[in-house]
Image (tube, helix red, strand yellow):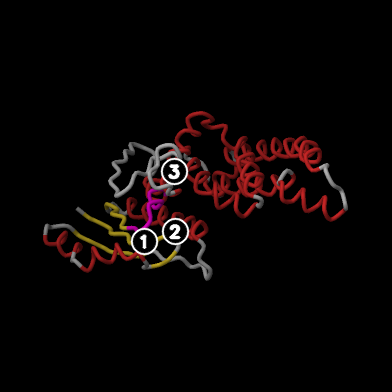
Amino acid sequence: MNIQIIKVPYDCGYRKQRQGLGPDRFLQHNIDGILEADGHQVEVTELESHSDFNIEVMTAFELNRLLADEVRQTIEKEFFPVVLSGNCNSCLGTIAGAGPENLGVVWFDAHGEFNTPETTLSGFLDGMPIAMATAMTGIFQGAWPMVDAFIGALGSFMAGSNTVSNMLFSLFQFSIADQLGISTILIVSLQNIGGAMGNMICVHNVIAACATVGLVGVEGLLIRRNLLPMTIVGILVGIIGLILVYTIGNGIF
């Protein structure tokens, strides 16, 4: 068998730290030599983030894009991809690269990955998005782009900023796009638009604006009034998202 070992030595955006040291440990213990001694042809490649400023979510998406491309190319040249990674979310890039046809997943890990806030023992967020994405995919299916931006808006309303909304829901959105087989770039972009849209009803922003102009006690009224324009914008964004995802956008991105 032709085997391509793909190393992704990252943990939470940091290269070769903590669990990110794991892939090299396999090579140090001669896993490639053992496979070759068993009659297999083995090649080894390592993925590396090109960002100068590593943030967990941003680096995770970059690495998953690189990993999906590498897995896809590995399969095209008729090699079997073996991914060694320090981060659980590398499963998204692996699945995206392998494609949905005849795909099955057997998952072994030191902690559960299909968790919800009710079932998790650790509160580890990295184990929840896959479960959330699976549930949402089953409910909305191909109409997800219509809902996408409202999730981003919900994150801004709860957390107070577009940035934190993206940190909360980007992996969730990526997982849904991956399971539906649609553009992950467009879906995460719609999440970002929704986060900006949610600033209209963000409690922090409304309070700051009212304090600046000297209005007191009307914060709730402003949030209620802003719900209508935010909803209209969200619907327009959803329609445009549907058109992009299922027509020209899916081929470009």
247 inside magenta stretch = no
Q: Earlier in the sequence, mark 2 or mark 3?
A: 2
At a point 45% along the width and 48% down the height, the residue shown is: 125
In the displayed structure, 18 sits above or below 72; it is: below
87 inside magenta stretch = yes
The residue under label 2 is which amino acid type?
Leu
Label 1 Cα neighbours within 10 Å, binned few <14 / some 14-19 / many ≥20:
many
Real-space Cα separation, disc 2 to disc 1, in angstroms: 8 Å
State the extent of the magenta-drawn residues as a range: 85-92
Residue at the far right: name it.
Answer: 214
Circle 2 or circle 3, nearest the eye: 3
In the displayed structure, 194 sits above or below 138; it is: below
SS at badge 1: strand
Q: Which mark is residue 176?
A: none
SS at badge 3: loop
Circle 1 or circle 3, nearest the eye: 3
The residue under label 1 is which amino acid type?
Val
Real-space Cα separation, disc 2 to disc 3, in angstroms: 19 Å
Real-space Cα separation, disc 1 to disc 3, in angstroms: 21 Å
Residue that carries the numbered disc 3 in the rendered image: 128
Count of marks placed on residues: 3
Q: Which mark is residue 63?
A: 2
From the viewer's side, name the closer residue of 196 and 214.
Answer: 214
Mark 2 touches mark 3? (CB < 8 Å): no
Q: Which of marks 2 and 1 is nearer the N terminus?
A: 1
In the displayed structure, 86 sits above or below 158; it is: below
Label 3 Cα neighbours within 10 Å, binned few <14 / some 14-19 / many ≥20:
many
In this image, 133 relative to 246: left or right?
Answer: left
Q: Which mark is residue 8?
A: 1
Q: Which of marks 1 and 3 is nearer the N terminus?
A: 1
SS at badge 2: helix
